[in-house]
Amino acid sequence: MNKISPEDEIQRLEDRLKENPDCGITHYNIGVNYLALRNMEKAKDYFKEAIKKDQDIAEAYVQLGGIAMNEGDLDGCFSYNDMASKIRHRFAVPHGNMGFVHLQKNNIDKAIASLKRAISFDPQFVQAHATLGSACLMQGDVDGCIAHSKKAIELEPKFGPAYNNMVLAYMEKNDNEEAKKCFEKAKETGYEVATEVLKEVEEKLSS
């Protein structure tokens, strides 16, 4: 069976809108398909329209937060995700996204609180585990970083950022053999670990 292209799906959904122009979910789904086409402005318009039609579509706020993040607007990203979390308190994704924004702003304690909340709602949330690993490392909790990074890899074995966390964590512990292993694993996933980090690991191993 041929997969429907985003363009065809948009046309199908636009036809549905003609029958029910006030359906927020249809607006949301059109926005998702515009996202798939990397047309951020159209996607944004449809997500905003979805919210006008139905203020309880938490996913639309999350998508708008993602677009804001893509545009470098951390405050906008946080605001949209905060709204989503208020609509559906146990929706893990906005809490994870707010944790990421806190981390970008160096609010480490707030980041950890948000990320732990996200994981409590969804223990399988790979990105939240990996981001929490980064936050733990920034806080100086090296073992916490390794534990959460390992959990992310257990859930998604090819998740490069988690291996990168462990490279840095094992270097902090002066366990350069493990750091080198994690570096190689990160490379296998296609994740670009900073070359200066590899140089430092190799220098320590050869000394």
Image (cartoon, grey):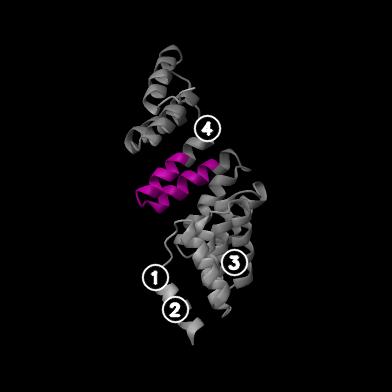
Instruction: Give the residue at x 48% y 77%.
Output: 201
Query: Which element is circle 1 on?
Result: helix
CA gap between label 4 and label 3 equals: 34 Å
In front here: 66 or 125? 125
Amino acid type shown at disc 1: Thr
Inter-mark Cα distance, 1 to 3: 21 Å
Which is the main secondary structure of the residues drawn in magenta?
helix
Q: Secondary structure at mark 2?
A: helix
* Mark 4 surroundings within 10 Å by alpha-carbon count, few (fewer than 14), some (14 through 19), many (20 or more): some
First along the sequence among labels 1 and 3: 3
Mark 4 or 2: in front is 2
- Along the line of sight, which residue is nearer the eye, 78 or 25? 25
Q: Which residue is mark 4?
A: 57
Of residue 93 and residue 154, the one placed in the foreground of this image is 154
User: Residue under circle 2?
Assistant: 200
Q: Are marks 1 and 4 in contact (CB under 8 Å)?
A: no
Q: Which residues are magenta?
A: 63-84
Disc 1 to disc 4, C-alpha distance: 43 Å
- Tell me the residue that label 3 is attached to: 145
* Amino acid tagged 3: Cys
Give how far across and how far down residue 66 sits, in percent: 43, 45
Label 4 sits on a secondary structure element that is loop
In this rendering, is residue 137 above or below 43? below
What residue lies at 46% left-to-right and 19% top-to-bottom?
Answer: 22
Dot 3 crowding, Cα within 10 Å, few <14, some 14–19, many 20+:
many
Q: Which circle, 1 or 4, is nearer the viewer? A: 1
Q: Say what amino acid the circle numbered 2 marks.
A: Glu
User: What residue would you read off at disc 1?
Assistant: 195
User: Residue at (63%, 57%) from the top-left corner?
Assistant: 151
Q: Earlier in the sequence, mark 2 or mark 1?
A: 1
1 and 3 marks in contact (CB < 8 Å): no
